[in-house]
Amino acid sequence: MPHVKLKRFLLTTLTAVALATGQGAAEQPESTTTRQTAAVADLSTRPGEDWGAFLGPTGNGRSGLTGMVVPWPAGGPRLVWHGELGEGYCGPAVALGRCVICDRVGKEIRIRCLAAETGLELWQERYPTDYADTFGYDGGPRAAAVIAGDAVITFGPEGRLECRALADGASRWHVNTSAAYHVVRNFFGVAAVPLVVDAGQTRLVVVPVGGSRPNAAPPSPDRLDLVKGLDSGLVAFDLATGKERWRSSDQLASYSTPVHAAINGRDTILAWMRDRFLVVDPATGGVQADFRWRADELFSVVAASPVVAGNEVLLSETYGPGSVLLTLGPGGLTAARQDQAGSRPIRSLRAHWATPVLHDGNLYGSSGRNAGDALLVCADWKSGAIRWSEAGLGRSSMVWADGHLIVLGEFGDLVLAKASPEAYQEVSRTRLVDPALVDPAAAAQGRGAELLVTPCWAAPVIARGYLYLRGQGRLVCLDLLPAASTDN
């Protein structure tokens, strides 16, 4: 179906699901409709790689796509479909021909499953939320959904962790983590994406919860320095039942999504919490090593995920110390190198929330705290030296595909650049428009309305040759492959 006929998602109204209030155990769904879970068929018409987890199947922002159209046409890659969204900042999860996207409409969190190649709605579920951002940002979801087999995992800004059936959205279990673990709300609510890992015969959903003692709320919501963690910094739940399997550390939660990696022949979970970076055993939750890396400033955040290569891990933040390259050995974690104190974004990689991408010994990422000073940079993995920098894209996010970087600037610029340490080599740049959209200001100038409007803060998603992008109030799907291609 042509995209011009798919300007808006179809809406269906289903019974709202009430907020959970359980204390430590998964609750049964409170929806009033009982549905049988059907087998999940693959709805895709082309083969290739799915992107059901944050930053892709390996959690590192690298796509296995080949045969991409390079350079792009003048107007950018072919527009397949787009649709309106409510509040929120997270990107979609895409797998088995389905695109799951979360947003907020009024006082409800909405989870929708769309046909990935057309944008047509397959199912929709909602639940009420009272989340209000401390600093005035919108109240929508920050954490992307995760598709794991026949399940969809969501983690709302207010702390509701839920497992649904991918086939029809039926709720399997949910936990109100804020109530169950006495969580004192973080500055920007919950933003870390759940991590699904295998531990023996059990599949676990691991999330930074950051629990504390009962009645631990400080006198003012901005005094998080007065809050102390207890024993549920990181918590693992059984994917099948929602029951807690382990809890780990007294660290409070950050916004950084944990990473699963094999280091020195051992399975690990790498979790960068509020103050400390943890290396955790997936089977038991035991902390194998830890390292403090955070700005001393109270109003600072840790948001980018760790980046792994062999037995080395890079942590990068923008409020204080910048980047550190850690080596994990028998004696624990040691710093192989770290940025000089007070270094500027042009001198070192200082990631805000976008996780840098590693390719051939070089890191590509956005460096800088604010839109005006942020730079797209290439940094040497071993030394941290900046090889090149490019201004003008704000706090951009990127993924690697077919030897190139696909960069989404926070103001709506979409860029294709070579992943080369020699120099910034821009191949294509566009601002996506749809001539059929009604925008009086644009129409007066004889052009269509722009599809990607600031803030564009979600990382791009690539699945089976399609590129999914989120800007304010809109989700866009583009085709990166040649017309009529059946490649990956």
Image (tube, rainbow, N blue to C red):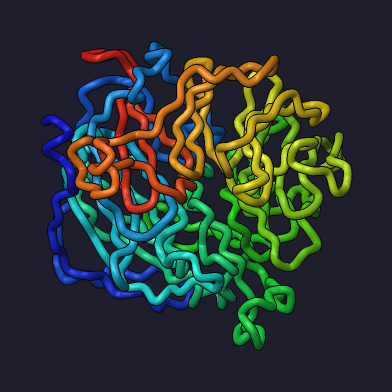
Rendering coords of residue 334 (x, y %): 86, 41
- Measured along the vertical axis of the image, is residue 279 above or below residue 389? below
- Measured along the vertical axis of the image, is residue 134 above or below residue 379? below
Q: Residue at x 48, y 44 (%)?
A: 411
428 sits left or right of 109 in the view: right
Question: Is the C terminus in the top left, top right, bottom left or bottom right quadrant?
Answer: top left
Q: Residue furthest front?
A: 444
Figure label count: 0
Q: Residue at x 80, y 28 (%)?
A: 385
The foreground one among 4 and 24 is 4
Rendering coords of residue 457 (x, y %): 49, 47
- Measured along the vertical axis of the image, is residue 3 above or below residue 7? above
Rendering coords of residue 33 (x, y %): 14, 66
Q: Quadrant of residue 325?
A: top right
Rendering coords of residue 381 (x, y %): 75, 27
Asked whether residue 473 is in view, the answer is: yes
- Measured along the vertical axis of the image, is residue 128 above or below residue 13? below
Asked whether residue 150 is in view, the answer is: no
Question: Is the N terminus in the top left, top right, bottom left or bottom right quadrant?
Answer: top left
282 sits left or right of 166 in the view: right
Q: Residue at x 31, y 29 (%)?
A: 478
Q: Residue at x 14, y 58 (%)?
A: 35
